Amino acid sequence: MADARADRLKRLLDLMRENELTGILLKSPANLFYFTGYLGPGILIVP
């Protein structure tokens, strides 16, 4: 499960590096956990 989260986060960051995404705001705890396993408050990820 942790490997799947790491893979999803790596793909997300790769898209940001390729300029497909400029940033992503994850406010929902479910979305944060899906990508990172993090259970805290919302975060902003930028390249």
Image: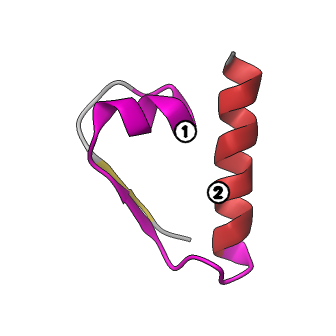
Q: Residues within 10 Å of mark 2 (few under 14, many from 20)?
A: some
- Circle 2 SS class: helix
Q: What residue appears at the point 32 percent right and 50 percent down from the top-left corner?
A: 43
- Left or right: residue 36 versus residue 24 is right
Whole-percent x, y for residue 39 in the image:
35, 24
The mark found on residue 25 in the picture is none
In this picture, is 27 found above or below 4? below
Residue that label 1 marks: 35
Q: Is residue 42 left or right of residue 25?
A: left
For residue 22, side relative to residue 6 (left or right): left
- Quarter where residue 19 is shown: bottom right
Magenta highlight range: 17-38
The disc labelled 2 sits on which kind of residue? Leu
> Is the Cβ of the residue at disc 1 closer than 8 Å to that at disc 2?
yes
Q: Where is mark 2, residue-wise?
A: 12
Mark 1 crowd level (few <14, some 14–19, many ≥20, 10 Å Cα): some
Q: Amino acid at mark 1?
A: Phe
Q: Is residue 6 above or below residue 20?
A: above
Quadrant housing the N terminus: top right
Quadrant containing the C terminus in the rendered view:
bottom right
Q: Identify the residue at image location x=68%, y=42%.
A: 8
Residue 42 picture quarter: top left
